[in-house]
Amino acid sequence: MKKGRCPTCRREAIKAGNKLWPFCSERCHLVDLGRWLNEEYRIPDEPDTSGGGVESVTPPDDER
Ligand SMILES: [Zn+2]
């Protein structure tokens, strides 16, 4: 099974049976479309790391 990275949210996206490949979901597909239409580069889900005052960072849930 082929996998890839969703260009919008950078999570793994599975290709099999996915019409929206390489996007993981319709939402990400639309986000990318809107990005092109607006000629902006905004990622709504991206946490703002540029600002100061980082209180706590939750480690990625990656236990294997
Ligand atoms: Zn995605």
Image: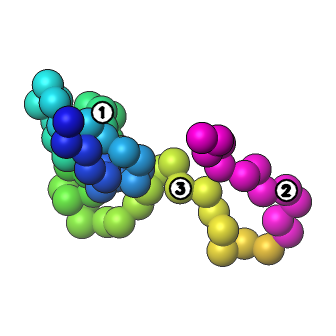
Residue drawn at point x = 78 percent, y = 56 percent: 57
Percent across and percent down for residue 3 are 25, 44
State the residue position of label 3. 46
Q: Residue 20, can we see it?
A: yes
In the rendered structure, which amino acid carries the disc numbered 3? Glu
Left/right of residue 53 with respect to residue 5 in the rendered view: right
Residue drawn at point x = 20 percent, y = 36 percent: 1
Left/right of residue 60 with respect to residue 58 in the rendered view: left
State the residue position of label 2. 56
Q: Residues within 10 Å of mark 3 (few under 14, many from 20)?
A: few
Residue drawn at point x = 63 percent, y = 63 percent: 48
Give, as a single range, the part of the protein colored magenta: 53-64
Q: Residues within 10 Å of mark 2 (few under 14, many from 20)?
A: few
Is residue 3 found inside the magenta-colored segment of the image? no
Q: Main secondary structure of the magenta part?
A: loop
Q: Secondary structure at mark 3?
A: loop
In the rendered structure, which amino acid carries the disc numbered 2? Ser
Left/right of residue 55 with respect to residue 45 in the rendered view: right
* 10 vs 42, nearest the viewer: 10
Gap in angstroms between the C-alphas marked 1 and 3? 16 Å
Percent across and percent down for residue 60 are 65, 49
In the rendered structure, which amino acid carries the disc numbered 1? Ser
Q: Earlier in the sequence, mark 2 or mark 1?
A: 1
Mark 2 in CB contact with mark 1 (< 8 angstroms): no
State the residue position of label 1. 25
Q: Earlier in the sequence, mark 1 or mark 3?
A: 1
* 4 vs 64, nearest the viewer: 64
Is residue 54 found inside the magenta-colored segment of the image? yes
Depth check, mark 3 against mark 2: the one in front is: 2
